[in-house]
Image (cartoon, rainbow, N blue to C red):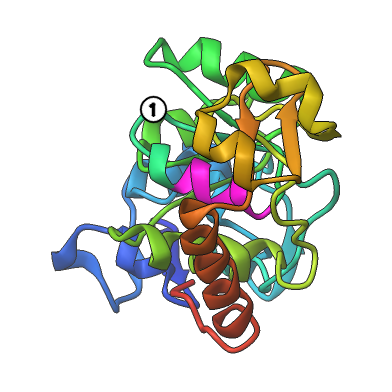
Amino acid sequence: MGDPTFVFHGGLDRLLPRARRGACLRQAGAQRASIKHAIEALGVPHTEVGAVRVDGRDAGLDEPIGESARIEVFPPAPGEGRDPLRFLADAHLGALARRLRLLGFDTVLARDGPDRELARLALAEDRIVLSRDRALLEHRRVQRGRFVRAQQVQEQLLEVAHRFGLAGLERPFTRCLECNGLLEPVEPEAVAASLPPAVAASQREFTRCADCALVYWPGTHWQRLRALVEEFQTLAGTAGAAS
């Protein structure tokens, strides 16, 4: 009997070491592990996996591997998943977290901390973990996540939108960019004391964060943010982010 072999489809092999990409991989000793542990040992977190087939039949990640098995690993289909669409972005994805909040998606930005604490938070609040830390995504408590491939924030945003089917679900300007709290309309008189005089004199529409009390209004900065929203809405429906 021989060692199991692994085939990664849909671009998943790009998560493997460069020398092992694009090939049918033989993994010595893998028959003593679960499918989950075997594919993660090769470099692919379980959050990146959709379907798994063993010798042509569907299999689960917790299934033990037998000898000479051929294991095919497929990524999730774009948009595949379940609600709620709540995110937990690791500390290195702050710009992405702000873009998601701008679009109205509930996104907590994690502080640096042990993986077990971030995984516990994600499980307790049923959040999708967005990270470039494979060890975090491999944690047994992380049920949903994405290893973010892109380096630039706009590409990261489109990648996440493509993976989780966010296009058309955005509700721009409904969350605080700083703390993720919900924004509520507020009368000018209620916030006048906290505004620059020029803003108080020229603006009549305001929202205020229900959590941190930060006040927003449609000034020059708002116009730049509006342009970012429109760019997302233009690109998200047609952008084919890397899978």
Predominant SS of the magenta segment:
helix
**Can residue 31 be seen from the camera position used here?**
no
| Region of the chain picked out in magenta, as a range | 96-103
Left-right relation of 130 to 16: right
Q: Is residue 12 left or right of residue 46?
A: left
As helix, strand or loop, the secondary structure at mark 1 comes to loop
- The answer to which image quadrant residue 92 occupies is top left
Residue sitting farthest toward the left: 19
In the rendered image, is residue 50 in sight? yes
Q: Is residue 67 above or below residue 115?
A: below
Q: Look at mark 1 in the image and give the residue it sits on.
A: 91
**Residue 72 location in percent, x, y?**
55, 69
Going by the image, does 51 lie left or right of 66?
right
| Residue in the foreground of this view, choosing between 5 and 88 | 88
User: Is residue 97 in the magenta section?
Assistant: yes
Residue drawn at x 57%, y 65% is 226
The N terminus - image quarter? bottom left
Q: Which of 188 and 138 is in front in this view?
A: 188
User: Is residue 131 depicted above or below 166 in this figure?
Assistant: above
In the picture as drawn, the residue positioned furthest to the bottom comes out as: 238
Queried whether the magenta region covers residue 99, the answer comes back as: yes
Residue at 28% from the left image edge and 58% from the top image edge: 151
Q: Which residue is drawn at 52% across and 51% down?
A: 99
The residue shown at (74%, 61%) is: 170
Q: Residue 110, how many percent across, how many down?
A: 49, 22
Is 152 drawn above or below residue 92 in the view shown?
below
Of residues 159 and 10, the one nearer the viewer is: 159
How far from the left and from the top, in percent, is residue 59?
73, 57
What's the amino acid at mark 1?
Ala
Question: Callout 1: few (<14), some (14-19), or many (20+) C-alpha neighbours within 10 Å?
Answer: some
Q: Nearer the viewer, residue 103 or 141?
A: 103
